[in-house]
Image (tube, rainbow, N blue to C red):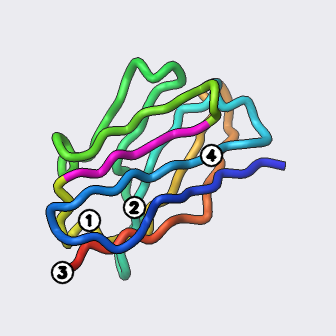
Amino acid sequence: QVQLVESGGGLVQPGGSLRLSCAASGFTFSSYVMSWYCQAPGKKRELVAAISTTGGSTNYADSVKGRFTISRDNAKNTVYLQMNSLKPEDTAVYYCNGIRALGPDNYWGQGTQVTVSS
């Protein structure tokens, strides 16, 4: 059974940090491009960051460049999102996504809430 389980969300003050984790199971993690998306109330789901199968290549939304870092540990089947200098506009549900590098398989986690507020 395929599972992507996010954790690490919560309430943080502006300027603070959070580290999201996404633990994968049920598929060959190292064959999947992994991404983090966010969705704020009333808005479309947007790509935040993506990382290649080996971790050698990353991509970020302009709004988070220099503040967020995506990484992965293929030995632990886990992808991370380190979020620094958080802003109120980063408030959203953050979703983990996996897309097979050579195929149509596309998996989503259930999401974790991040709220940035004083």
Q: Residue at x 36, y 43 (%)?
A: 49
What is the secondary structure assignment of the residue under circle 1?
helix
* Amino acid type shown at disc 2: Cys
At label 4, which amino acid type do we have? Ala
Which quarter of the figure has residue 9? bottom left
Lower sequence index among marks 4 and 3: 4
Question: Mark 2–mark 1 contact, CB under 8 Å?
Answer: yes
Give x and y (percent) for residue 33: 53, 32
State the separation of the CA atoms marked 2 and 3: 20 Å
Instruction: Please tell me the numbered disc located at residue 42.
Output: none
Percent position (x, y) of residue 35? 47, 43
Q: Main secondary structure of the magenta part?
A: strand
Residue 82 is covered by the magenta coloring = yes
38 over 25 or under it: above or below: below
The answer to which of marks 2 and 4 sits earlier in the sequence is 4
Numbered disc in front, either 4 or 3? 3
Check disc 3 and report its element: helix, strand or loop. loop
Magenta-colored span: 78-84
Q: Amino acid at mark 3?
A: Ser
Q: Nearer the viewer, residue 99 or 24?
A: 24
Which label belongs to residue 118?
3
- Residue wearing tag 2: 38
Residue 110 rendering spot, x and y as whole percentages: 61, 65
- Residue at screen point 39% across, 51% down: 19
Residue for badge 4: 23
**Which callout, 3 or 1, points to the residue nearer the camera?**
3
Real-space Cα distance between discs 4 and 3?
30 Å
